[in-house]
Image (cartoon, rainbow, N blue to C red):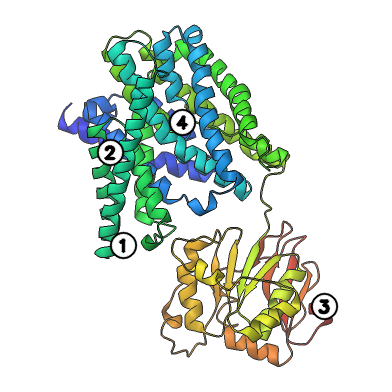
Amino acid sequence: MTDDEILLGLALTLVLATGSQILASKLRVPALIILLPVGFAAGAITDVIHPDRLMGTAFSALVSLSVAVILYDAGLGLDLRKLKGHTRGIVGRLLVYGVLLTFLVIATVSPAMFDMPLRVASMLGVILVVSGPTVVGPLLDFVRPTDKVRRILIWEGTLTDPIGGILGALTFHAIATTHQIDIGRGYQLGQFAISLSVGFVGGAVGTALLWFTLRTLRLGETLGTLSQLATVIAVSAGCDIVRDDTGLIAAIVTGLAVANIRGFDMPSRRPFLETLVQLIIGLLFVSISSTVTPASLVPVLLPSLALIAILVLVVRPLVAYLSTTHSGLTRGERAFIGWMDPRGIVAAATASAFSASLVDLGISGAARILPVTFLVIVGTVLLYSLTAAPVARRLGVVREAGTRILLVGGEPWVVDLGRALRSAGLDVLMWAGLDEQRERIKETGIALATGDLLATAINPGARLEGVTAVFLATDDDDFNALASVVMQDSVEGPVYRVGPPHDSHGVVAPYTGGDILFGRSLVRHVLAERYERGARFVVQPSSTPVPPEHDILFLVRADHRLEPVTERQRTVPQEGDTVLLLGSVPTAAGQ
């Protein structure tokens, strides 16, 4: 290729990867639904984005390192403290039964369905055992299942990737060297154990290096992120040099260690790393799908649809049934786990790498591995994307759409505000520092957060599960301002604070951004003074006219979503809403 063609190919790949993900976010669908067809169409129309032409033999190595970065980022999101009791057992059984049954079924039916030898069918079976967080995560974000179900599926999807990668490498080498598949022999089991050992050693080395760079050297956010990338890539590459595909294990072990060793204190959101991972996913899917030709899909289209039906309707429900029996999960939760097993980036990456190598070795049927994998990825992602939400609703495993509020503060007007919000049908949790304030909260019957909750919330590595909005209303404006910034990454929804006085000389409060509750007119001391003069909070239907000298503070939508009036947002009441007002005259309705 000429320099101009290479530049055009790289630019076009980047634009297609980014544009597809933007479109997917606007349509609220998983990005794979857009990325795979776009890459396929681009590969059919033009040759300039074909990775073999752009990067040659280096593409396989780049894919391996890219997947390692993705798995490291996925490992950072796994908190071992939440994998306990029944959850740990369920995830372990899903991994064992899922890998074994999926492999055995695909290896059994594929020779007849796709006219390929058993050894190639075994290669296909190993490739398709993986799922992946890059697909499962966005689907679960859209569906919003219960925390228990989400945790199980995320752990399963993340841990199957390195397992599938290692099994794929062992299967590939067995086929390439002996022209048969004999994974069940003790020799192959020993090879698997060696691969695991290499990966764990690499993970230990990566963890030690990151401890040195992040804790001992105390690098800032920018250099710290660069050190993470350099460490993960170096360790993964080193492990792959020693033993193929062990870099995936090293990457996820390093991520798990960094996320769970207390001294690291990794933030729950890592903007630069998240952006890089998102870009890598887009580039890989566009590049890999561009290598699939229309001519290669036609012969395997109908058999692939039949294989998808077997995986979705037989294999996955059976795996879920065996894994969740006597687990304490409800029938709906068990059924939803049986209806969630899409394939993702690791399946595509391993299919691209191994099928090309087997084709080069002249093994018959190997050319069908990539198109079949492509169709299974597209089919499972499309099917689960279209059905996951209605299935979850039908099974009753969707979290309620309402808002769970954490109201921070213990002044009399704040406690009365919490009582009014609760009377509007909201789930309210309160926290206060002083004993007298906590006693005041207890007297109202509002749930009182534990003493360490706020410390947990402002820990950069923590998340407040179930809390969808935080309102900071203590009598310390600087505290409210600082906490509103730090807690943003610990809550699923927004964090608001009451405004400081206009003439405040606080160290932080006057200069910190963020959305201010109730606008600039109802700042903290004004609210307190009005309450002391007799103003009270009033809850009434939106159809009732707002009395004079009353200010609208919140709207509670018909589905129990809370929308506050803020400096930047003016809410408009609709039919069926409930309005929370601050009235200048005491009103019995607000008590």
Left or right: residue 220 versus residue 278 is left
Q: Earlier in the sequence, mark 3 or mark 1?
A: 1
- Which residue in the rendered view is the most extreme toward the right? 588
The answer to which of 220 and 265 lies nearer the viewer is 265
Judge depth for marks 2 and 3 and give the one in front: 3
Q: Which mark is residue 130?
A: 4
Percent position of residue 222, x then y:
28, 60
Q: Earlier in the sequence, mark 1 or mark 2?
A: 2
Percent position of residue 71, x then y:
38, 42
Q: Which mark is residue 43?
A: none
Percent position of residue 522, x then y:
60, 82
Kind of residue at disc 2: Ala
Q: Earlier in the sequence, mark 3 or mark 4?
A: 4
Q: Secondary structure at mark 1?
A: helix
The span from disc 1 to disc 4 (Cα, nearest Å) is 33 Å
Is the Cβ of the residue at disc 1 closer than 8 Å to that at disc 4?
no
Judge depth for marks 2 and 4 and give the one in front: 4
- At 59% across and 20% down in the image, what residue appears? 309
Q: Secondary structure at mark 4?
A: loop
- At 43% across and 90% down in the image, what residue appears? 505
Q: Which residue is mark 1?
A: 221
Percent position of residue 135, x then y:
49, 38
Judge depth for marks 3 and 4 and give the one in front: 4
The span from disc 1 to disc 2 (Cα, nearest Å) is 29 Å
Is the Cβ of the residue at disc 2 closer than 8 Å to that at disc 3?
no
Q: Which residue is mark 2?
A: 11
The span from disc 3 to disc 4 (Cα, nearest Å) is 57 Å
Q: Quadrant of the N terminus?
A: top left
Crowding at dot 2, Cα within 10 Å, few <14 / some 14-19 / many 20+, comes out as: some
Left or right: residue 234 versus residue 539 is left
